[in-house]
Image (spheres, rainbow, N blue to C red):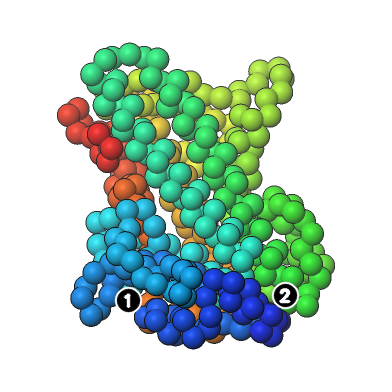
Amino acid sequence: MKNVDSEGSSSLRNTVRTAKREEFAKVPYVHHVPADGRTVFLAPYVDKTDHKWKVHVPSSRGLAWIFAEPVESCYYAELIADQAKDIHVEIMDVIARHYSFDPVLRNALELLRRLLNCAVVLDKYFIWLSQFRRTKNPMLANLVQTDLEFLFGNVRTSYDIMQNMLEELWKKTKQPPLKQGSFRRMVQMTPSNLEQKYGLPKPMIDYYQSTKDFFLTIRKIRDDIYHYQTAPKADLTSIIFCDIEGFALSERHLFVGLKSYAPDIWPTNKIKPNELVSVLALMSYIIIKTVQATEGFSQALAASIIPLESISESYRLFLRSPYVPHLLKLDRYLNEQWIEEGVSYSLMS
């Protein structure tokens, strides 16, 4: 486990641009104002005195609070406020409380957006399904195909964002800098090379190894979609079929690389007699693996770089969004796969 070098009080002067140190005494979830270069991430919270949502914002008079119940935002709480609408995103919580250097925090917020993008893709799936049931228009398959292709690219980018966070933090450990520039280059190195060249601790090396196969599969599919090259008998994309119970792929013509995961995604009893398999199951499986990857990264990070003193001791960060319920139902979607006619899980319709 590596130490992060303290940067003295220089970064505290950066926060003075928006609030003086003593101003943070007004914020109930801030128990420690860092003087080591970190940023204090401000977000909504429920005030225990009147049970109303508030958020502190910088003003000409210091930090002032306003009423602000979140619609789509992180918030601080000791316990989750609404289990039906909110979720604990471990990586955002760990970064905001322990590693909130500005570039790291910015990457964490971008990763959060990528996770929400995954949920948006699911909502669009149900919108397109409702539309197909009303119109029987097979051209809606093109919209699903586009969303599925976007999902692969979105997930692929999420891994590089995590790599960016690690590289920014690694600069502060006095170890050789990580100059690989991409997650792909790191997972393709051997464990011994990662240790000898960069001094990476075992938890982070193990993380790279545990995510390698799935990441390279997603990368291959993403590259085949976005970097098309003509080749004999190329099988770079798969055609989407419309079914009243959901959109489907032909089991014989899956995206390259997915066949090894097929038993985990599509059990035999979920394959239709015409050998069609569920797109919803595929989307759900990919997103589940992505969420697990962010959780594994946060745990490997905390085990590899000693966490700095927590800015908030009893509070944690949660995420609220109109699309979060999809992230809470991923296991259900993977289990059901096909949706009975008349049922829709769209949150926007």
Mark found first going from the N terminus, 1 or 2: 1
Q: Nearer the viewer, residue 15 or 206?
A: 15
Q: Is residue 136 above or below residue 283?
A: above
Residue at 68% in and 53% down: 183
Q: Residue 165 — which label?
A: none
> Mark 1 — residue?
78
In the rendered image, residue 302, in percent from the top left (x then y), is placed at 57, 75
SS at mark 2?
Answer: loop
Tell me if mark 1 has few (under 14), some (14-19) or many (20+) residues whose alpha carbon lies within 10 angstroms of its own: some
Where does the image place residue 166, in percent across and percent down from the top left? 66, 65
Q: Are marks 1 and 2 in contact (CB under 8 Å)?
A: no
Q: Residues within 10 Å of mark 2 (few under 14, many from 20)?
A: some
Q: Is residue 231 left or right of residue 244?
A: right
Tell which residue pokes out farthest to the left in this image. Answer: 342
Q: Amino acid at mark 1?
A: Glu
Residue 129, placed above or below residue 215: above
- x 46%, y 75%: residue: 61
Question: In percent of the image, x 46 and y 69: which residue is there?
Answer: 59
* Residue occupying image coordinates x 39% and y 81%: 26
Secondary structure under tag 1 reads loop
Q: Examine the rendering and report whether any part of residue 31 can be seen.
A: yes
- Where does label 2 land, which residue? 172
Q: Is residue 161 above or below residue 297?
A: above
The total of numbered circles placed on residues is 2
Q: Is residue 81 left or right of residue 208?
A: left
Pinpoint residue 326: horizontal percent, then vertical percent. 33, 47
Does residue 263 show up? no
3D distance between C-alphas at marks 1 and 2: 30 Å
* Quadrant of the image containing the C terminus: top left
Question: Residue 129: x, y in percent?
Answer: 30, 27
Q: Give 243 or 79, whichever is nearer the viewer.
A: 79
